[in-house]
Image (cartoon, rainbow, N blue to C red):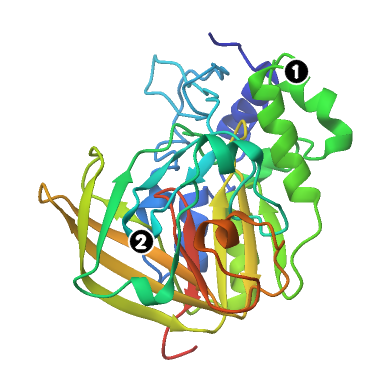
Amino acid sequence: MGFHLPYILALLTFLLVASHAVLSPELYWKTSLPNTPMPKAVSDLLHPDFTEDKGTSVTVGKGSGVRVNTGKPGKRTNVGVGKGGVSVSTGHKGRPVYVGVNPGKSPFNYLYAASENQLHDNPNVALFFLEEDIHPGAKMNLQFTKSSNKATFLPRQVAETIPFSSNKLPEILSKFSVTPRSVEAEMIKKTLAECEDSTVAGEEKHCATSLESMIDFSTSKLGKDVQAISTEVEKETAMQTYTVTQVEKKTAGGKAVACHKQNYAYAVFYCHATRTTKTYLVSMEGADGTKAKAVAVCHTDTSAWNPKHLAFQVLKVKPGTVPVCHFLPEDHIVWIPNKKSA
């Protein structure tokens, strides 16, 4: 089911017709980060022909993920809203690990305790493991699934005209033609609440409502000599055993910015900067030959995390005792300094 969004339509039309000087998100990346390759997690969310003259409409549809596509001439631009939330699950000591999409609290917000559903309905939820568990030859039962959250980036000039505050929730729902108390409304409400919550001690956070905003936040913490990396898998497969073939340490406990895609009516990323993170790029091969390069992040200081966070309950460890690691889903991004500038 879909609904037209005349508010965004009017803004897009204005930009298409009247603002040739506005940089597209892709051009902003190339201008700001000329030496930084764009990861697939970003390029998948772009509108490559956004500035072309074409018919445009925006719809919010249940179950399809949120996306804004600029259509070809004579076609429509569609925006869909799916009901998924990010969840990843790991099998410590041989249990299956799911990299998927489910509703609920984000496992990447470390102030939250695990929910009853996470603990009892699916005790393996959250892709957490110990640093010692990831090495060449290690085997893990994994399933990498594509996120149903297909929301794409709006240009910053559009995103900044749209309210982004819990205090403005009724107005936001109205602009996106979302029914109050619907699944989509609860997703929007949850994302706003998480963006407005306090952050873990020692971290700085920012909810980026555009790619330009994500770039600005990340480079303000790390400088412009950076890498942006994301998990990439050849294809979606069923649960299978993956063997680790190579582990590349990207950072050794220093600065990093992790950006996690949220459930919203357009692309919003929950970004947090930390100085106590190790980042790895883990090459793996599945039993069926499927190759994957998964980004793994290890947090070396978890002393300020909620003691009932899912990671501690899955791994049976206490805050601040050992590094806690997790893989990132395919639509999440980690920003790190280049080694020569780290």
Question: Please, what secondary structure does the residue beneath circle 1 have?
Answer: loop
Residue at the image point whose x is 30% and y is 50% from the top: 142
Q: Residue 13 occupies which quadrant of the picture?
A: top right
Residue in the foreground of this view, choosing between 231 and 124: 124
Residue at the image point whose x is 41% and y is 24% from the top: 71
Farthest left residue in view: 289
Q: Percent x, y for residue 152?
A: 50, 37
Q: Residue 237 occupies which quadrant of the picture?
A: top left
Is residue 35 visible to the viewer in this orientation of the structure? no
Q: Callout 1, which amino acid?
A: Arg
Q: Residue 191 occupies which quadrant of the picture?
A: top right
Residue in the foreground of this view, choosing between 121 and 42: 121
Task: Report the residue marked by disc 1.
Answer: 181
Asked if residue 12 is positioned above or below residue 99 in the image, the reply reads above
Farthest top residue in view: 1
Task: Report the residue marked by disc 2.
Answer: 93
Q: Callout 2, which amino acid?
A: Lys
Going from N to C along the chain, the mark reached first, 2 or 1, is 2
Q: Residues within 10 Å of mark 1 (few under 14, many from 20)?
A: few
Residue at the image point whose x is 42% and y is 37% from the top: 147
Question: Please, what secondary structure does the residue beneath circle 2 have?
Answer: helix
Q: Percent x, y for residue 154?
A: 58, 39
Horizontal side of 272 relative to 153 (left or right) equals right
Measure the alpha-carbon separation of dots 2 and 1: 40 Å
Is residue 268 visible to the viewer in this orientation of the structure? yes
Residue in the foreground of this view, choosing between 307 and 76: 307
